[in-house]
Amino acid sequence: MTTGLILMGGGARAAYQVGVLDALREILVADGHPAAANPFDVICGTSAGAINAAALASHAADFGHGVDRIVKTWSALRASDIYRTDLRRAGGNALHWIASLTMGWLVRTQPRSLFDNTPLVELLQQMIDFERFRDALDAGKLRALAITASSYTSGHHVTYYQSRMPVPPWSRIQRLACETELDIDHLLASVAIPFVFPAVSLALNGRHEYFGDGSIRQVAPISPAIHLGAERVLIIGAGHIEHGMSPPAHTGSQYVYPSLAQIAGHALSSIFLDGLANDIERLSRINRTLGLVPDQQRGDSLLRPIGLLAIVPSQRLDTLAIGRAKALPRTVRTILRMTGATDRRGAALVSYLLFESVYTQELIALGRSDTLARRDEVQAFFAPEVSAPPGGPASPPPYV
């Protein structure tokens, strides 16, 4: 059965995914799965999840070693590995924004982003070897890798993918797929959080467009894996999913006018979390509906159930970020303080930008414990299937 892995976005929160992957490896090895064997045929990533996805794909020939490398990288991460934190560049960018907003008629150039993420390029070159990824494709260690970004130019949500076997591009309302040879630019585009990191130019349909974070307008994050042939999908989120009404994260905050950081954090949570929750609910409902259709009728159609396991944080990650902002460089703290991000109400924004080991290690530990607590579900998900689902491998159903 073709197994897909979907890694969602969330900035620094993506460290949680690393802990989940480490625990998955432990469970699989304990069950007799070879440590080097890659359990995922299709890997899809968005935003920071795209970095983890590409890193795994480049180590598809030795999954265990790949997970080790990713764990070590995230465990020792510093904000300066992701974006410039020195006074000249970080402070200069912030002043540029302020000047543009207050004295726009005197500013000759428009600011491109709050932070300069050029250090991220070097980190990606250390983490990811796209040549090794292509070798893994050729050797049959992996079926496909997909990285998603959002075009500021046309408004389209685009999944760039590279696969071992030809897969026809797909198109839906405001979203489409483009087969290409993936590289670091696709990752930089996918991780370009709005306003925080600069947009990146990518080729699309014969012209270049500017792209930002792939979580923007991502209404169907499970779709790419299914189009690329996945018959069951493991989804690793980067945020706690609430069911129904829940109390406010910070007592009393509902009575205080929201700070800029609180509004920004809420907007980022909507970008990174809502699409996944809605798509999981939609796929689960479709699977239940298909379960009511007789096998013969389902086998004669394109419709098929998709195996699903979602692992998301058991705790609110903004709560874990409270008090950790002091680990950030002073220049960054000063910039965030101007937005109100350093108090409890601004913790959500900080949780996306806190690329510091004091926070990432805690997220890795949470990812491990959440996954090990669901060992039975993980084992059931990876259990060998007697046969493919009714309908067998076929063209993707029209609802994705």
Image: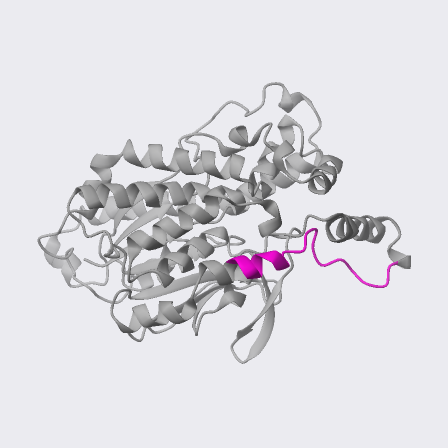
Residue at point 59%, 31% (across, down): 324
In the picture provided, is 281 more to the left or to the right than 128?
left
Image quarter in which the N terminus is found: bottom left
Note whether 322 is above or below 60 in the view shown: above
Residue 210 versus residue 37: which sits nearer the camera? 37
In the picture provided, is 308 more to the left or to the right than 298?
right
Image quarter in which the C terminus is found: bottom left
Q: Is residue 282 visible?
A: no
Residue at the left extreme?
A: 386
Residue 21 versus residue 281: which sits nearer the camera? 21
Residue at point 53%, 64% (across, down): 156
Q: Is residue 74 visible?
A: yes
Task: Find the magenta span and give its range.
Answer: 107-123
Note whether 107 is above or below 18 in the view shown: below
Residue at the bottom extreme?
A: 206
The x and y percentages for residue 203 are: 54, 74
In the picture provided, is 370 more to the left or to the right than 187?
left
The x and y percentages for residue 7 are: 40, 51
In the picture provided, is 18 more to the left or to the right than 319?
left
Based on the picture, tell me whether residue 116 belongs to the magenta stretch. Answer: yes
Note whether 275 is above or below 340 in the view shown: below
Residue at point 36%, 49% (across, down): 68
Residue 270 lies in quadrant: top right
Based on the picture, tell me whether residue 155 belongs to the magenta stretch. Answer: no
Q: Main secondary structure of the magenta part?
A: loop
